[in-house]
Amino acid sequence: MTSEIRRNESGHIGYEYREIDVPRELSSLCLDSYPCFGWEQDPNHETGGGQDRQTRKTGASGKKETMTLYFRRDRSICNKTELTRLQRNFDGCVAELQALERAKTTTATMAALVIGAIGTAFMAGSTFAVTASPPAIWLTILLAIPGMIGWICPYPLYRRWVRKKTAEIEPLKEQKYDEIETICERGDRLLH
């Protein structure tokens, strides 16, 4: 935001407010980038020496933490329309970064689950073959081998697929970070 504070005739500054939920790993990026679009951290959410940012866990496993960040911006800021457009582009880039991060594990997870389920089906067939009367031991062994492979292989394959997908995605993430930097530079030029 500009270094001088603009006030109307009565001395009042009108603000617009925004709160955003971002994953913890992208919170620093948002805190550093939103000032390029005229936003500043809302001092009404400060407690003592630090920001009062709400943190909550999301997802089935509870691994991803999101943070709620609070911002405010002067309503009478210059170039507001263009800054808002750039901010939307920035938000789109952040959403794409989140999608790329999820894409690292989505395919690998689905493939590992399918292989595990197929292995379980073979083990179920093996169990039914041994409990049949008379027991078909040769069929039990024949079905147990792919069943065990289906139970053992998913994790190593998952790790390999994640590494491969990460290698594919990292250049795309770097392009998004470069695009974010360009957007923030344009926004900063409009403010100064």
Image (cartoon, helix red, strand yellow):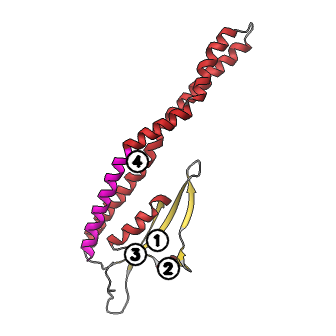
Up/down of 141 relative to 185, above or below: above
Q: Name the main secondary structure of what is drawn in magenta.
A: helix
Q: In what element is the residue under mark 4?
A: helix
Q: Quadrant of the N terminus?
A: bottom left
Q: Which residue in the protein does label 4 denote?
A: 100
Q: Which residue is mark 1?
A: 70
Which of the marked residues, 2 or 4, is nearer the chain's N terminus?
2
Where residue 46 appears, as percent x and y from the top left, is 52, 78
Category of crowding for the residue at label 4, using alpha-carbon neighbours closer than 10 angstroms: few (below 14), some (14–19), many (at least 20)? some
- Are there few (<14), some (14-19), or many (20+) residues within 10 Å of tag 1? many
Q: Tell which tag, 1 or 4, sits nearer the viewer.
A: 4
Q: Amino acid at mark 3?
A: Glu
Number of numbered markers: 4
Q: In this figure, which residue is indicated by the disc labeled 2?
A: 44
Q: Is residue 18 left or right of residue 171?
A: right
* Above or below, comparing residue 184 to residue 169 in the picture: below
Q: Residue at x 33, y 74 (%)?
A: 38
Front of the two marks 3 and 2: 3
Q: Which residue position holds label 3? A: 40
